[in-house]
Structures are given as C-alpha cells and as structure tokens.
Amino acid sequence: MRANSLHHERINTMTFKALVVEQNGDADVSATIQELSEDRLPAGDVTVAIQYTTVNYKDGLCMQPNSPLVRDYPHVAGIDFAGTVETSNDPRYFAGDKVVLTGWHVGETHWGGYSQKARVNGDWLVPLPDGLTTKQAMAVGTAGLAAGLAVIALEDHGLNPNQGEVLVTGAAGGVGSIATAMLSKLGYEVAAVTGRPETEEYLKSLGATRVVARNEIDTAIKKPLERPVWAGCVDAVGGEMLARVLGQLKYGGSVAAVGLAGGAAFPASVIPFLLRGVNLLGIDTVLHPFEKRIKAWQRIATDLPLEKLDAMIRPATLAEVPTLASEILAGQIKGRIVVDVN
Ligand code: NDP
C-alpha cells in the first residue's frame, strides 16, 4: 500500500530529479542532481516515468568535457532507459505501458535516461519484451542489444555451433558479457578475450570455455594470414585486435564489429577477405530499424540465460553515475551497471 501511494504521489508531482551536466568554461563539465519541472523536458509525444537506466561506454563519452556527441548544455545524458508511459499522444502507447528506449541519439542530442522522467518520440520506443522486467531490460541495455544483433548477424552469415570456437573480445565488459552468455546458451564454444585475468572465473561462469589473454591478440599484424582458429567473432574492441582477428578467422568466417574500446583506427590487410572469404559485419544500434529491433529483443529474452544476466548486474544510483562513467572509459567495469533512478 505504502509503495503504491508513494509511486502515485511521484507520478502526480510536476517536478522530477535528473542528473544535469553543465559546462564550466571550455574544458570542464559538472554533473549534479537537480529538481526540474516538467516544462524543462524536450519536445516529444510520449512522457515516460523512468525506472532504470544504465552506464554504457558511450555514456562515459557523453559525460566527458567537450564531448563531440553532446550538442547543448545543460544536458541530461543516458543513452537508454526502461520505464512506464505516463502520458502519450502516440496511438501505439498508453499510460501504464512498459517501454524500453535505446539509441536515436537520446542521451546525446536529446535529453536521456539519467532522470526520473523523459519525453521522447514514440518511434524511438519499443514495448518491454515479454519475459523481461524493466530492470533486466536495462541489464541488457544498449550494450546487450548490440551483442544480440551481433549474434544474429553472425548466424545470418552462416555461423553455427558445429564450426568451432567463437571469439568474444572485451569479454568482461557489457557487450562481451552478454555475447558470451548468449553464445554459450546457444551451444557455441566461446573463447573470451580479456585484459583482466582476475575475471576468468566470472567469464567461465557466463559460459566461456576458455579465456584468452588480451596481450596475445592485441598487437599489430605481422602477417595478414595466421593459423585459422575462430569460426566467428563478436568484437567490442576494434583497433589492432580486430585487424589481427580478421587474419585468424576460418575460411568464410565473420567478425561482427560492435565497438572501439581499444581504438577506432583499423590497421588491417584486405588479404583475409580475398584469400579466406571472411566477412566484416557492421553493428549499429542507434538507427536500427524497428522490426529488427523487436526481433533482436525477442531473441535476447529467449536466448540470454536470465540467471546469468542477473549475476552480471552491479546496482547503482543516479549519484554514482559520474564516477561510473569515468570507470567505464578506463575499462574498469565488469558486466552491466543498472541504475535505479528513483
Ligand atoms: P565496456 O567498457 O563495458 O566493455 C569494453 C571492454 O573492452 C572492457 O571491459 C575491456 O574488457 C575491453 N577493453 C577496454 N579497453 C581496452 C583496450 N584499450 N584494449 C583492448 N580491450 C579493451 O563497454 P561496453 O561493453 O558498453 O561497450 C563496448 C564497445 O562497444 C564500446 O566501444 C561501445 O561504444 C561499443 N558499442 C557499440 C554499439 C553499437 O551500436 N555499435 C552499442 C553498444 C556499445 P576486458 O577487461 O575483458 O579486456
């Protein structure tokens, strides 16, 4: 009863709390929790009472001073959230509907999820997938959606569990943890690359069959073709590691390129494409079409073992976000952060 009346009271309150990033001069930003009135929310046709958000690598970038991703200050970052529709002028959504938002530059050019309320375009939302709570949807978040899209892309290019080991890079991070757990549940042998040997037990608990030290694989290519080892790869790292992996793929194998935690420059050779017929598959979550998003969320709800997802969660509050945003850029976050904004 008490919880209900508190919830009711909050929904009817015209102010809400948000983590507001402000620019201090040219080279610095500060983030403080502020009480804002609803008229500060940006334009949009659906207003959502947010329950959970998360911290992705890109959130780390958006909280940085002079972030090229953020256009105007004051800014509310947070590239994804899950919650309950409060008011809607979009015929597809009604008050009380549970929804999830990822992408569409929310948290970059439009105020995002580090807030108790958001106002967005209904086209950017998806209904909460069957089988997931709003908390679990944010444990998945943008990183998990990208991992799911990567697995689907690899399968669409012919990957199946009989072909051998699949490599996951940046494995102890968000994309990597979800990809590892999902591939393992689907019956793949997963080799997990990490720069943090202390995460070995964690990675094996997610289903990795072996752990590969980062320094074995993140050096510049010496030969364009190496011994073919991997049937496929979900890559969260980019840079030299991605270039090396291309030369280690089995004939016709694919890499799904998801991230750039190790760098955006790509010092590779075209030889693996020409002599081994390998594929480099680009993964984008921001503008990904609605129907395919829905399918990816359904696959995630079915193929991601929820007990493993729950074990990846590090709970956090809105006040902890600035620290966590710095930690994720330093590669120090294990698994997925879930922020309860209330
Ligand atoms: P995390 O920080 O959670 O994971 C990244 C992992 O990469 C780290 O945990 C670490 O894993 C590894 N890593 C970090 N720095 C380096 C380095 N210098 N060299 C090699 N490995 C490194 O981030 P996310 O999982 O949230 O995101 C991963 C990447 O995917 C980011 O670049 C992000 O922008 C991108 N991304 C792209 C999306 C898209 O739409 N394409 C959507 C979501 C994310 P370990 O310690 O195990 O080695």
Image (spheres, rainbow, N blue to C red):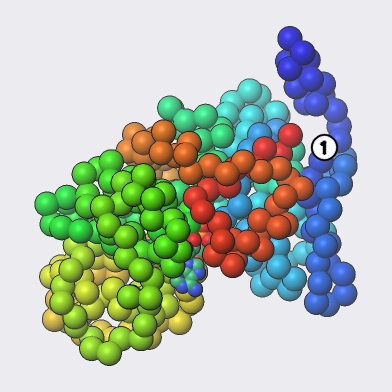
Does residue 156 appear left or right of residue 42 in this picture?
left
Q: Residues within 10 Å of mark 1 (few under 14, many from 20)?
A: some
Q: Which residue is mark 1?
A: 16
Check the image and report above or below for 267 versus 234.
Answer: below
Residue 297: give x, y in percent of width and height. 41, 40
Q: Quadrant of the C terminus?
A: top right
Residue 300: give x, y in percent of width and height. 38, 40
Mark 1 lies on a secondary structure that is strand
Tell me the residue at 82%/62% (across/down): 30
Residue type at the position of mark 1: Phe
Tell me the residue at 66%/63% (across/down): 326
Q: Quadrant of residue 21?
A: bottom right
Does residue 49 appear left or right of residue 137 in this picture?
right
Q: Could you tell me if residue 90 is visible in this image?
A: no
Number of numbered callouts drawn: 1
Q: Is mark 1 within 8 Å of ligand 1?
A: no
